[in-house]
Amino acid sequence: MTGPSATFGFKDVDPAAKPGLVRGVFDRVARRYDLMNDLMSGGVHRLWKDATAARLNPQPGETIVDCAGGTGDMARRFARMARRVQERRGGADAKVFVIDYNAEMIAAGRERGFEPEIAWAVGDAQALPLPDRCADAYVISFGIRNVTDIPKALREARRVLKPGGRFLCLEFSRPVTEALQKAYDAYSFKVIPEIGRLVAQDRDSYQYLVESIRRFPDQKRFARMIAEAGFGRVDYTNFTGGVAALHTGRAI
């Protein structure tokens, strides 16, 4: 194709078409999203998420944006952690805004139960429905690679953060050894789509998800993108040999 393009798995597509394609994927997987995460990772994604929440260290009174927050898996961690600190030290409730482009994912999250600290909204990572400098922290977990314009989403994260606000992005990344990369590729392309077919009756969506991981920038390149968006103290931590990575920064 001629002109600018966006990635959709291994395909290059018109940027205007990508949001609808991604929405279709998550419309189909929303009801089994959390179950599939457990099956695909053997539950290891929970350890990665726990480590991310611990790094965030949410506090009473903070405003936290959980972008691409889907079913609220991370938001509930943040709310519980802030509540435990509040019970010891007092202070105001934390506020966690779950913002996701997909209404079906938001609906699935709301059905899991009410948490007083959490508010839910359908919204675009590239144009967040929030004012400038309103948040103490911004977290996006396994969502940034689905965005059409990643640099624009990073700039939006910077816009809504207060000076010094924390940025955390948990995302699949590049294994650090060739042997692990080969094993991970074999598992991803042969096993994960089949799990999707058997459990979610949807092989194509999970084929897209593993392809989208392969086209996402590696750790060093993504760290440069975060710095270019206006963040300082940019760093990353590999999980499970680089299968996933937690990228961090501070709004400056």
Image (cartoon, rainbow, N blue to C red):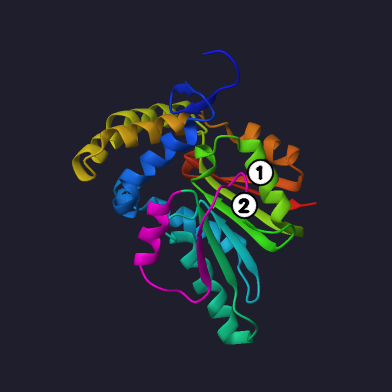
Question: What is the quadrant of residue 149 in the picture?
Answer: top right
The residues colored magenta run 102-127
Q: Dot 2 corresponds to which residue?
A: 128
Q: Percent from the top left, x then y, of residue 177? A: 49, 30
- Vertical placement of residue 251 versus 63, above or below: above
Q: Number of numbered discs present?
A: 2
Q: Is residue 27 left or right of residue 160?
A: left
Q: Which residue is mark 1?
A: 154
Instruction: Return the residue found at the far top.
Output: 2
Cα gap from disc 1 to disc 2, whole angstroms: 11 Å
Which comes sooner in the sequence, label 1 or label 2? 2
Q: Is residue 116 magenta?
A: yes
Residue 140 x, y percent position in the rendering: 55, 51
Q: Is residue 94 visible?
A: yes
Q: Is residue 38 visible?
A: no
Residue 239 vs residue 213, the one in the foreground: 213
Q: Would residue 76 be counted in the magenta stretch? A: no
Q: Quadrant of residue 160?
A: bottom right
Name the amino acid type tagged 1.
Leu
